[in-house]
Image (cartoon, rainbow, N blue to C red):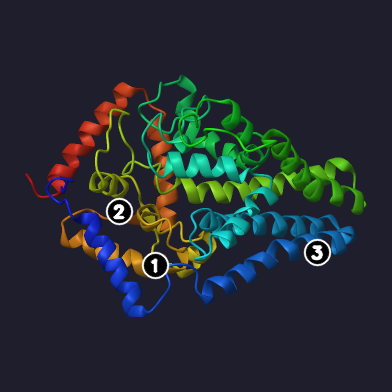
Amino acid sequence: MADSISDPQLFQVLKERINSYFEAERKNRKGDRAMWRKIGIISMVPVAGYIFLLVFGERSLMLAFIGYLVYIIGSALFVVNIAHDASHQAISTKRSINQLLSFSWNIVGISKYLWEIKHHHSHHIYTNIPHADVDIAESPLLRFSPAYPYKNYYKHQFLYAIPLYGLFGIFIVFVKDFVLLYGEKVNGKGAKTLPAFFFGRLVFTKLLFLLVAFVVPLLVLPYAWWQVLLMFLVCLAVGGALMLLVLVVPHINEVATLADDNFSINNRNAWVLHQIHCTVDSSPNSKLLGWLSGGLNTHLIHHLFPNICHIHYINLTRIVKQTLQERGIPYHEKSFAMSLYDHFKYLRVLGQPSAVLQQLAVINCAVSFIRDGNL
């Protein structure tokens, strides 16, 4: 296994090869025409869904539900594909354009400011490190790391995680920003002073989304309030769950996990090797999955070079894979279906007490040792 001492030039080699790719192909590292076409297409999906909901939704509950679903899923596609890249300054060479597009987080009720703090200053730097990566933070409901205390009901988490993930859309829009704002999870991670009138702007953002996504359909459609509310919540749950799965599958699995938080990264190459270890790509050659997920199925290249537009990820992932293979460094990839299976399988493993996890770890090491031909 390579380390930052035996392979001190890994990041530099990757950087040079990727730069050579853009020079040879005469491409911009940011969004190209294909990306701008994609922005146009994806922008139309939630708009078309919302118009369909208000114009044709009165004809039947089924048509209303379809309109709602297209609107909410289209909104999720927009933030995953466009707001996410824009927040990384990856769409345009002009910072002002990226800033404008990144404000689409606020359009769906999520604070751009808080999301960027927890994503850039926590998840991307301390990926999968317990107590440091906000995305795998200790939770009373789910155990995402063996470093966290065990609770007896975690043994069922691989089952109740499925409906719980459905609550993610509601949580991220209406709850998580306040948890981040008043909790301890983002302290020391870039939030020195809040923007002026931040709390009022935060509440306004959420009320505006609620007005557009629920109140207007409630006033326009000829259905009872509880029917409109149910459609809204179900569609928000579906969109949120799809978005969450794309985010957790690359990191929360048996391959990518870290056993404890006693982990330090002391140089650039150590950080690169850490990212390689704790990220699993899912169907990295799938153009369809890459198009829908904003390239997050090719997750490793995103973590290594987050300021490159995701429209280039498939080709760049091949360069990363070849470079790692040349240096004897494992590149982790699976089909998306297998990645989903492994994620829930690992949730079941994490539902066991720490002593059992240690025994399983010893067994897995022994199996890997024999499989690699060492015995």
* Residue at which label 3 appears: 52
| Closer to the eye: label 3 or 1 | 1
**Mark 2 is on which residue type?**
His
Q: Residue at x 20, y 61 (%)?
A: 325
Seen in the image, is 244 located left or right of residue 217?
A: left
Task: State how far apart marks 1 and 2 are (Cα).
Answer: 15 Å
Seen in the image, is 76 located left or right of residue 360?
A: right
Q: Position of residue 257 (x, y in %)?
A: 33, 38
Q: Residue at x 60, y 40 (%)?
A: 168
Choose top left, top right, bottom left or bottom right for residue 322.
Answer: bottom left
Seen in the image, is 16 located left or right of residue 302?
A: left
Q: Residue at x 64, y 44 (%)?
A: 110
Circle on res. 314: 1
Q: Residue at x 42, y 36 (%)?
A: 133
* Residue at which label 2 appears: 332
Seen in the image, is 67 located left or right of residue 22?
A: right
Circle on res. 185: none
**Mark 1 is on which residue type?**
Ile
